[in-house]
Image (cartoon, rainbow, N blue to C red):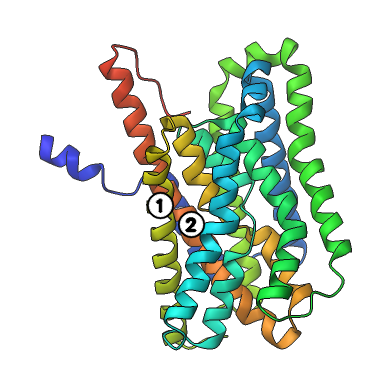
Amino acid sequence: MARMKKLLQFLPDGFTLAIVAMVVVASIVPCYGVGAVIFGHLTTLAIATMFFMQGARLSREAVVAGLAHWRLHLTILACTFLLFPLLAFGFSALFPHLLSPVVMLGLLYISLLPSTVQSSIAFTSIAHGNIPAAICSATFSTLLGVIATPIAVGLLLNTHVGSTGGEGFRGVGAIFAELLLPFVVGQLLRPWIGGWAARNKHILKFTDRGSVILVVYTAFSAAVMRGLWHQLPLSGFAEIILANAVLLAVVLTITTYGSRLLGFERPEEIAIVFCGSKKSAATGVPMANVLFGASTVGLVVLPLIIFHQMQLMVCAVLAKRYVRQYEAELRASGMTVSLVE
């Protein structure tokens, strides 16, 4: 029986299986047209609800502490804008002919992108990490990326940056409207609804995981409609998957053990792992449409789309592992273990 329980710990949970199922469903029945618009609105609603509930639950002291955690923020930004490019461009310099040029270009483009906001915070919440710090770091990463990524692409990838101002300002507006505004409203209403939000933790669990699943379906549907399964031969897909897997594994290893070497506690380690290892497809795909030519953009964003799905699946497994560690600590301290929030 003990051996069976140990084996079951390594099997995917329902959340991970749901993400895989969404990839399969999106490949067979992608949403498009009116359906894509409806699912886009549902995704926005789920994300806004998640941030509203986070704002309603978090104490003002916790938010201020998250803003003041400058050492953690610098570590996450260094992972996003220094570690990733060093790894990708270093790999390109050492092994210039190991990958095809288009796969290498896509890999380099991934390294220059900002972190995700929604999924980074959702996984940090699921794993019982430092949520206020994750919100601050992930949001600032995206805002900085609106400016830094086009410049870096223009300088390092020898492309014409072009007119990115409109896209950038739309991205900033979306961040404030869909993420920060609901969080601020939740904070302002906390004196009246904070107790209710604390008693209804299952709503936050639903919005955390539901928003990730919706993002997977809508993002992968868009990729399928762009001809995801027809743009490269099977060997090309194998190259992308292998290169992405190696990059993600190296970054996750460095963020996990590096945060421990730097003396961060587990909640901060979780924020570093989930914010510092992510790259935003929501920012990267529309930005690529402006930065690259029409004949190149599809193949450039293909590695990003696959990396995006891969990071969600891997982080779902990691979040489950952190939850098990959290519950084990509660048992060791004699506290009652609750369901995963």
Q: Residue at x 67, y 64 (%)?
A: 284
Quick check: 256 left or right of 271? left
Classify mark 2: helix, strand or loop: helix
Q: Nearer the viewer, mark 1 or mark 2?
A: 1
Relative depth, front residue between 172 and 186: 172
Between 318 and 226, which is closer to the camera in this rendering? 318
> Residue 47's x, y, as percent?
67, 42
CA neighbours of label 2 inside 10 A, class few (<14), some (14 to 19), many (20+): many
Front residue of 11/152: it is 152
Image quarter for residue 3?
Answer: top left
Residue 286 seen in this snapshot: no
The amino acid marked with disc number 1 is Ile
Q: Quadrant of the N terminus?
A: top left
Depth check, front residue: 95 or 341: 95
Whether residue 283 is visible = yes
Q: Is residue 243 found left or right of 298 in the rendered image?
A: left
- Under mark 2, the amino acid is Gln
Compared with 296, 275 (above or below) is: above
Mark 1 vs mark 2, CA separation in Å = 15 Å
Element on which disc 1 rests: helix
Left or right: 162, with 106 as reference point: right
| Quarter of the rendering containing residue 229 | bottom right
Residue 46 image label: none
Q: Which residue has dot 1 on it?
A: 254
Residue 146: x, y in percent? 76, 57
Q: Which mark is residue 311?
A: 2
Q: Is residue 231 above or below residue 129?
A: below
Query: Could you tell which of marks 1 and 2 lies nearer the N-terminus?
Result: 1
Q: Residue at x 79, y 54 (%)?
A: 171
The residue sitting at 38% across, 36% down in the picture is 322
The location of residue 271, given as percent across then percent down, is 51, 38
Measuring from the top left, give residue 270's x and y in whole percent: 46, 38
